[in-house]
Image (tube, grey):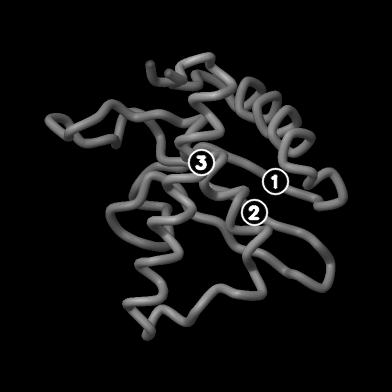
Amino acid sequence: MSAVIQTEDELRAKLAEWQKILRLQDWIINVSIFRERDMKGENRCGEVEWTLEKRMASIRILDPVDYPDGLMEEQDMELTLVHELLHLHLVTVTPDHEDELRHCALEQAIDAISRGLVALKRGLTG
């Protein structure tokens, strides 16, 4: 079951819900739907930038019109949002992109945790 969010208001409502669940209410977080051409990286469903000292972050979620056809799974914007939010808890242990092995391990861990949390919320465990 995927969650395609149609409006920025729906996305902000999901953000508020997940900030509470993940105990990130003390962060000021902006979230927006972006076209692929406006994302900072390529081949991403989402991305996050942060300023740790101010506990501020900006999350960009890929616009559904740019999500590629024929992938193994449908776009799940809620899952992407949770994934990007989890990065904020791990800011201080995030390796440089040059450290590919550690960066890959971190991404895999965040992916597994975010999938588990979203499945629990949706009652899809078991």
Report, in whole angstroms, how far the alpha carbon at label 2 lies from the one at label 3.
Answer: 18 Å
Provide residue 105's location: percent of width, then percent of height.
39, 66
What kind of element bears circle 3?
helix
Q: Mark 2 points at which residue?
A: 58
Q: Residue at x 80, y 62 (%)?
A: 55
Q: Name the residue under label 3.
A: 114
Q: Earlier in the sequence, mark 1 or mark 2?
A: 1
Numbered mark located on residue 30 in the image: 1
Q: Residue furthest bottom?
A: 98
Q: Which residue is drawn at 45% across and 47% down?
A: 46
**Along the line of sight, which residue is nearer the eye, 40 or 109?**
109
Report, in whole angstroms, how far the alpha carbon at label 3 lies from the one at label 1.
Answer: 19 Å
Q: Which residue is drawn at 38% across and 56% down?
A: 108
Label 2 Cα crowd, 10 Å radius (few <14 / some 14-19 / many 20+): some
Task: Check whether the beta carbons of the residues at disc 1 and disc 2 lie within 8 A of each other.
Answer: yes
| Front tag of 2 and 3 | 3
